[in-house]
Amino acid sequence: MCGRFALTSSSADLRNFLSGVDLDDFPARYNIAPTQPILVVTAGEGRERGSNLADRRAVLVRWGFTPAWVKDPKEFPLLINARAETAIGKASFRAAMRHRRVLIPASGFYEWHRPPKESGGKPQAYWIRPRNGGIVAFAGLMETWSSADGSEVDTGAILTTSANAGISAIHDRMPVVIKPEDFSRWLDCRTQEPREVADLTQPVQDDFFEAVPVSDKVNKVANMGPDLQEPVVIERPLKSPEKQRQDNGQLSFF
């Protein structure tokens, strides 16, 4: 699952990462939450002949996917994530998987480890970022919902997949990461069927991310400063399931 993320890189770095996508300057965002606007990148409509830049464009959409066939969004659940393994077969996401795949740039995401109730432990928040720094692109889906009066709202969701070994001690799901060399394939909805890009939705390599324990201030949408990402000391650091088996001979998060 991905319920919060951040985008704190400069506009210049984003343009470079996204191969020259045109976008305005914007402030760093440390706590992006569902229903808020998020930046997504789509395939463009063609550049002028001779351009050496990728054919892509950046738009803002509401984080919370609404299928075009929904009559009243207020009566429809908020879809912030879509499971990559099943999205192609789900009525809500089928059309977007075929026609409106997008990239969602981020500096990282937040996830919570929630211990079993019987343990008495409290949820612990983690700031999960690329180990080598920089920007990451999540796989996403986009849909434009039209109301009866003709007004339109662009909406989006983040695709998730099973967690890799580096994240599985925290949560069993994580965002799908699209590498720069695969941007064009993922965005190409004209010639690439969903089944032809399914290989891109596998979990990223185990050491791609690092998880930093942070305070529970990220739980409140009103908290939006860089202090959200400051590390905190926790009494019992998580171990990977594999490491825990070696230590205790059994599977446990503690």
Image (cartoon, rainbow, N blue to C red):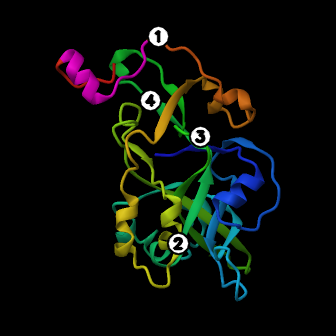
Q: Residue 205 vs residue 188: left or right?
A: left
Q: Which residue is mark 3?
A: 133
Q: Which sits earlier in the primary sequence, circle 1 or circle 3?
A: 3
Using the image, determine if residue 111 lies above or below residue 38.
Answer: above
The span from disc 2 to disc 4 (Cα, nearest Å) is 34 Å
Judge depth for marks 2 and 4 and give the one in front.
2
Q: Which sits earlier in the primary sequence, circle 3 or circle 2?
A: 3
Pointer 4: residues within 10 angstroms few (<14), some, or many (20+)?
some
Q: Which sits earlier in the primary sequence, circle 4 or circle 3?
A: 4
At a point 76% along the width and 68% down the height, the residue shown is 22
Total marks placed: 4
Part of the protein shown in magenta: 236-248
Determine whether the residue tagged by mark 4 lies in a helix, strand or loop.
strand
Labels 2 and 4 touching (C-beta < 8 A) = no
Q: Which residue is mark 1?
A: 235
Q: Amino acid at mark 2?
A: Ser
Q: Amino acid at mark 4?
A: His
Q: Which residue is mark 4?
A: 113
At a point 36% along the width and 67% down the height, the residue shown is 198
The span from disc 1 to disc 2 (Cα, nearest Å) is 44 Å
Q: Which sits earlier in the primary sequence, circle 4 or circle 1?
A: 4
Mark linked to residue 51: none
The span from disc 3 to disc 2 (Cα, nearest Å) is 22 Å
Tell me, yes or no, whether the highlighted magenta stretch contains residue 140.
no
Whether residue 233 is visible: yes
Pointer 3: residues within 10 angstroms few (<14), some, or many (20+)?
few
73 or 9, which is in the foreground?
9
Q: Residue 203 vs residue 7: left or right?
A: left
Labels 4 and 3 touching (C-beta < 8 A) = no
Judge depth for marks 1 and 2 and give the one in front.
2
Q: Position of residue 231 (x, y in %)?
A: 60, 22
Which residue in the rendered view is the most extreme toward the left? 249
